[in-house]
Amino acid sequence: MDLSTGINPHSYPLFELPATALSRLPEAAQLRELAEIAATAYGAPSASHVAAAPGTQILLPRVASLLRPGKALVLGPTYAEHARAAAIAGHAVAEVSDFNALADADLAVLVNPNNPDGQVIEKPRLLELAALLRAKGGLLVVDEAFMDVGPIEQSLAGDVGAGGIVVLRSFGKFFGLAGVRLGFALADQLTAERLDAQLGPWAVAGPALEYGIRALLDAGWQATMRQRLAEEAMRLDLLLGRFDVPVAGGTSLFRYLSFAEAPSLFSVLGEQGVLVRHFAERPGVLRVGLPGSEPEWQRLESALAAWAARRKDVPKEIGQ
């Protein structure tokens, strides 16, 4: 059972695709329709501020290449691909733990809410940073992959028109359709045009266009799903708490654990066939996704019980 991702286990309902989604090249008019719908769904100023791509992963080095090679700072610890993409683009890359340090960058990158701890940087601080970077020709990249389940009032999607800001939005995580490969860069019009030109024609596949248009228009499903995920995240907190596993943060798509016994928990869960995300450079940290069904909830509970039993059997050191 794979609980290592932050992907919604309750995917948007599958539907029968029109044959043309597979038999014809994607239509330019349909791509424009998707951009218009995405602009509305995410709060961008207009469709001309949206560049659609086959997943945000392919956008990362292209966004980093919007600037000449310089100093790239990534607020971490976070998703490792941002640093790798900046290095591919020729930047000298470093990870910093202090938000204020990002002001020294040419290219500043952060994830909001952050992966894996769910930390949120408030919008006024982001706009102040963006203004500082813009004044010296720099760029702020904010990856809002989990903003669908985050505090939407902190999103910078509506502020990209001023320039110097690129917001990345991921489709597959919230809609549980990671295999569709669809993502968006929200930026000022010239930057969006540059990214579109780099991606070239037919970048977004026909099936992704179909699913993107229908799912992003379905506000009712989105609202219901946000409520469901919030309730299930609370359920996961309660389940972990029963076995004295502290929850240190996260979003309603994943929970963040940071405690001394994390390595043993990871090991025992793995023995029980339950995979959670561990971080080799931070052994005391785990990320746990949501089970997708009642049998999966029961399986996780059994695995946690096995870990709790193992803990009781471990002799305590003298003096403890």
Image: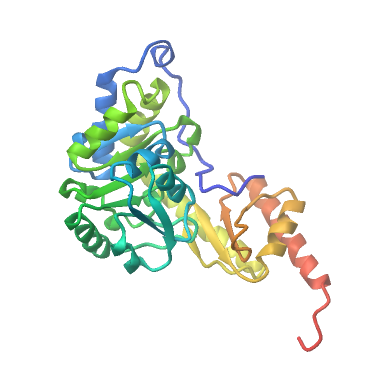
* Viewer-nearest residue: 206 or 152: 206
Instruction: Tell me where residue 266 appears, x and y as whole percent.
Output: 69, 58
Q: Is residue 226 left or right of residue 108?
A: right
Please identify the residue farthest to the bottom as the structure is shown: 319
Whether residue 46 appears in this view of the structure is: no
Q: Is residue 72 left or right of residue 159?
A: right
Instruction: Tell me where residue 242 appears, x and y as whole percent.
Output: 64, 67
Identify which residue is drawn at 28% across, 46% down: 166
Instruction: Tell me where residue 87 appears, x and y as whole percent.
Output: 43, 47
Quadrant of residue 282 within the rendered picture: bottom right
Q: Is residue 142 left or right of residue 276?
A: left
Identify which residue is drawn at 21% across, 34% down: 47
Whether residue 190 appears in this view of the structure is: yes
Instruction: Tell me where residue 88 appears, x and y as whole percent.
Output: 43, 42
Image vertical order of residue 261 relative to residue 152, above or below: below
Image vertical order of residue 38 relative to residue 83, above or below: above
* Viewer-nearest residue: 174 or 15: 174
Identify which residue is drawn at 76% across, 86% down: 320
Identify which residue is drawn at 24% across, 39% down: 40
